Image (cartoon, grey):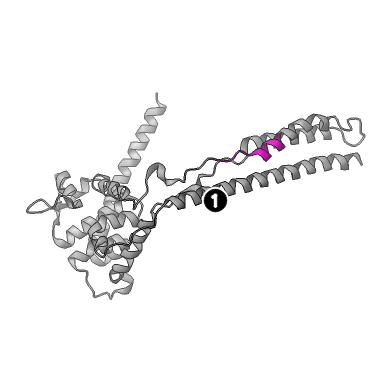
Amino acid sequence: MEIVVLIGCVLGFVGLMSLAWWLDGRAYQKAVSAAWDRHLATVPEPADLAQDTIVRMGPAALAVLIADGPWHAYEAVVAGLAAKGSVRPGRNYRDRATLLCQWEKAPPEEDVEKAIWDQSRDLADLHPDVVIRPVVQRLVSEGVLREGETLHVPFRPTVPVWAKTAGVLGLALAWPVAHLFHNGPYLGKGPVLAAGVLIVLSLLMFINAHTERPTALRLPRLSDRGEQVVKQARAQFAHLDPAVRDESQRYEPDEVAFAVALFGDRALARFSEDLVERFAEWRAHWGELAHRARREEYLRRWSG
């Protein structure tokens, strides 16, 4: 009978803690839902896009919205330049195969091509961040793309009252449980072990009692207007999808950049297998430099 009472005390308290955890979890979820409702109430409906908006934004902007990272956008721009004959295969000062700019005059000021013109004639030595970063900043300023702290809905977490109350109750009950039936012939050190279990569970309630879950409050990378841009771009340039084009259909020079921006390597391979290999070499080169820099920084920090 005594051991049944002891087991009942422990299981009863575990059930009480589970109930407290559930109650706090429900309160937290209600607070999260309320935070989302407040956020959505302050976000205006995106205005309908003008017919020329997608083309005016340019392939680099569309590639930034569709893919995460600058490489996809940079490759779309360079592929478009190659299709128009503005870059040509060549060899750099290290006698390595590369692509070189061959404009007769500087491109328009507002285009990404102008940044390429200003930075380097050797495209292999130009990191995508240099020319694509201004595009990202423009999209953020226009409210199409989210970046930085705005990726989360403003939220004040609830206080886990029930879990903390259960934790205090568990610590308070640990002492009497440890002294229950201490002379019982079959229990031995059972009450002490049970009290230890209560203490551990109570401390866990304090430590892990519904800490913030940022993923529940994370905003999508694109705003509603950004989603509208992507949806309209896919519809407007659906005819460029390699999956619906015959093998014999060649892309027009003005179509290549948009095709690569929206459909990536599938469209690029349809245009030029050489560029597929060249871009892969560039990515590997810059990836190796980044890995080496991280390794050197790690060794520098730990070597004192």
Residue 237, image quadrant: bottom left
Q: Is residue 160 magenta?
A: yes
Q: Is residue 208 visible?
A: yes
Question: What residue is drawn where x is 32% and y is 45%?
Answer: 287
Q: Decide if residue 164 is on the left or right side of residue 226.
A: right
> Along the horizontal axis of the image, is 227 left or right of 203?
left
Query: Going 30% across and 47% down the picture, which residue do you hit?
Result: 141
Does residue 130 belong to the magenta stretch? no
Q: Position of residue 154 (x, y in %)?
A: 47, 43
The vertical placement of 18 against 300, above or below, is: below
Foreground of the two, 122 or 240: 240
Which residue is the extreme one toward the left?
104
Helix, strand or loop status at disc 1 = helix
Specify the quadrant that holds the C terminus: top left
- Screen quadrant of the N terminus: top right
Q: Nearer the viewer, residue 141 or 135?
A: 141
> What residue is disc 1 on?
33
Measuring from the top left, give residue 242's x and y in whole percent: 30, 70
Q: Which residues are magenta?
A: 157-167
206 or 44, nearer to the observer: 44
Closer-to-camera residue (26/276)? 26
Instruction: Determine the residue positioned at 30% across, 51% down.
Output: 71
Residue 98 seen from this side: no
The amino acid type, in three-letter code, at marker 1 is Ser
**Prevailing secondary structure of the magenta residues:** helix
